[in-house]
């Protein structure tokens, strides 16, 4: 947890540096507008002379022709570029070489390695897979969340390291709560859990939670980015936010959708595997146990999210809120259902 905390601080420093760089780029673009406009005015005056024509003399008031001189032409290229940079677009700054970002990713990898070692050692101490109670599931689930984040960093075309603050922060909170409130000593497995389906069902479920967590983080940033884009034209302070350096809300939404689809596929298998395991353990596929019901509710929420976005055109903030509601249901299922509802799935260990 200490190494995760260092990574979290480094990611936060990177976001602060992004805000500062965005502010500098916005101020520089705004300052360049009058300079470029003046240069364009001078060029428009010199243009006739360069082509061999005499420069037009300014028309005086009450002259014989009674006409006024045409206004000088403004060079659209320079002013247009400066205007676009000042209207809330992401500044052209390379953040890939940020020292704080490199430190953050390195600390995340080290924390992940230590986390993996702790989980494996817990499994050796228990003589089984380490996810038979809430503490062990939290230990394994947060490990999977970090693993999914690092995996996406390796394979994604978009640089998603800006999500490190959200991911490491979430992992820190979950690990802290699990250590303080959910810790239990190693105990033997109940008879119903002594099955190969414990490995299959719970591992796939934790993998789905890892993808849902990443989709949740992307949806939160998407809502923040969408708000910035809506008011960036009038609010100069939002132009100088770190959000100006991140992908736009549409790109974030597309990424969240892809990640959540992977999580939904894994959760569908979780639901099916749980039914098969229930038939092996209790002689029925479905019994309306509280845990079974909430697993199905989560499946319905994410199915509705995918269906609404694909067929009903629910884009933007509505799809982001559905994804956030879905992950909130996952957390509710893990905490409230395990602690306060009794049933055949009461394996909190508390």
Image (tube, helix red, strand yellow):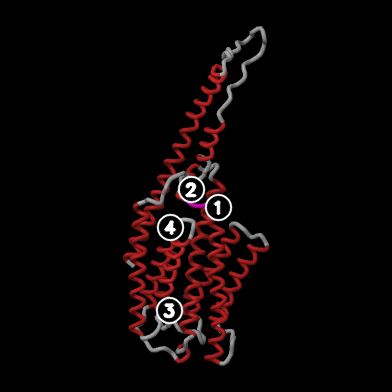
Horizontal side, residue 114 vs residue 329: left or right: left
* Label 2 sits on residue: 244
The residue indicated by pointer 1 is 226
Where disc 3 sits, the SS reads helix
Q: Position of residue 122 (x, y in %)?
A: 35, 80
Residue 101 colored in magenta in the image: no
The residue positioned 57% from the left and 31% from the top of the image is 76
Mark toward the viewer: 2 or 4: 4
Q: Residue at x 40, y 45 (%)?
A: 20
Where is residue 111, by image quadrant? bottom left
Q: Is residue 69 above or below residue 306?
A: above
Q: Earlier in the sequence, mark 2 or mark 4?
A: 4
Pointer 4 residue: 161
Report helix, strand or loop for mark 1. Answer: helix
Identify the mark nearer the N-term, 2 or 3: 3
For residue 329, the mark is: none
Viewer-nearest of discs 3 and 4: 4
Q: Is residue 241 above or below residue 139?
A: above
- Residue 183 relative to residue 261: left or right: left
* Front of the two marks 2 and 3: 2
Q: Is residue 224 above or below residue 124?
A: above
Residue at the (38%, 57%) spot, across then down: 11
């Amino acid at each position: 947890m200490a190494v995760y905390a260092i990574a979290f601080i480094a990611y936060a420093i990177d976001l602060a540096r992004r805000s500062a760089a965005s502010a500098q780029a916005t101020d520089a673009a705004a300052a360049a507008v009058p300079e470029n406009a003046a240069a364009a005015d001078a060029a428009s005056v010199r243009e006739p002379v360069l082509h061999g024509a005499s420069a037009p003399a300014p028309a005086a008031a009450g002259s014989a022709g009674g006409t006024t001189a045409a206004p000088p032409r403004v060079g659209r290229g320079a002013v247009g570029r400066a205007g676009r940079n000042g209207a809330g677009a992401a500044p052209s700054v390379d953040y890939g070489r940020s020292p704080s970002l490199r430190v953050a990713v390195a600390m995340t990898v080290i924390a992940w390695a230590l986390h993996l070692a702790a989980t494996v050692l817990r499994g050796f101490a228990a003589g089984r897979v380490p996810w038979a109670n809430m503490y062990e599931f939290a230990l394994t689930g947060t490990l999977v969340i970090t693993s999914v984040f690092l995996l996406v960093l390796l394979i994604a075309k978009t640089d998603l390291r800006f999500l490190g603050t959200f991911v490491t922060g979430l992992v820190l909170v979950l690990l802290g709560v699990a250590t303080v409130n959910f810790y239990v000593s190693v105990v033997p497995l109940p008879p119903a859990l002594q099955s190969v389906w414990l490995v299959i069902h719970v591992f796939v479920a934790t993998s789905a939670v890892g993808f849902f967590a990443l989709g949740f983080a992307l949806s939160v940033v998407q809502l923040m980015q969408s708000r910035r884009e809506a008011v960036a034209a009038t609010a100069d302070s939002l132009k100088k936010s770190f959000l100006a350096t991140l992908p736009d809300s549409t790109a974030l939404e597309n990424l969240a959708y892809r990640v959540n689809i992977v999580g939904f596929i894994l959760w569908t298998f979780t639901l099916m595997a749980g039914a098969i395991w229930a038939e092996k353990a209790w002689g029925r596929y479905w019994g309306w146990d509280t845990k079974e019901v909430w697993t199905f509710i989560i499946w319905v929420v994410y199915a509705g999210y995918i269906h609404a976005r694909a067929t009903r055109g629910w884009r933007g903030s509505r799809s982001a809120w559905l994804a956030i509601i879905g992950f909130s249901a996952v957390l509710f299922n893990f905490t409230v259902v395990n602690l306060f509802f009794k049933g055949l799935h009461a394996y909190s260990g508390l």
